[in-house]
Image (cartoon, helix red, strand yellow):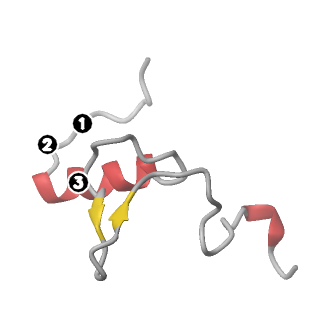
Amino acid sequence: MSTGKPAKKPLTPEAARILEQYRNAGKGIPAGSEGTGTDANGTPIKPSGAPPAQPIRRSGSRGK
């Protein structure tokens, strides 16, 4: 499956990490992944079904 764009140069590790964050945005956080641990108060952070603090903005909801 091709996107039609030839790969010009390999991504730097930093760029790959940023792209991976965008790809994973909106998905559930898998258990044991990076980002799980403790917050500033030492409370364990666990993935849960709770909604995000800020609603996800979608392209069709401008001005509402």
Q: Where the C terminus falls, by quadrant?
A: bottom right
How far across and down, in percent of the image, does residue 13 sit? 11, 52
Label for residue 24?
none
At label 1, the amino acid type is: Ala
* Mark sitting earlier along the chain (3/1): 1
**Contact (CB < 8 A) between labels 1 and 2?**
yes
Residue under label 1, please give it: 7
Residue at position x 35%, y 41% in the image: 31
Task: Give x and y (percent) for residue 8.
Answer: 20, 42
Residue marked by disc 2: 10
Which dot, 3 or 1, sits closer to the camera? 3
Q: Residue 24 at what x, y percent from top left? A: 43, 47
Q: Which residue is mark 3?
A: 17
Q: Secondary structure at mark 3?
A: helix
- Residue occupying image coordinates x 14% and y 44%: 9
Name the residue: 72% across, 62% down. Answer: 58
Task: Give, as a three-letter code, the residue at label 2.
Answer: Pro
Along the viewing direction, whichever of 6 and 28 lies nearer the viewer: 28
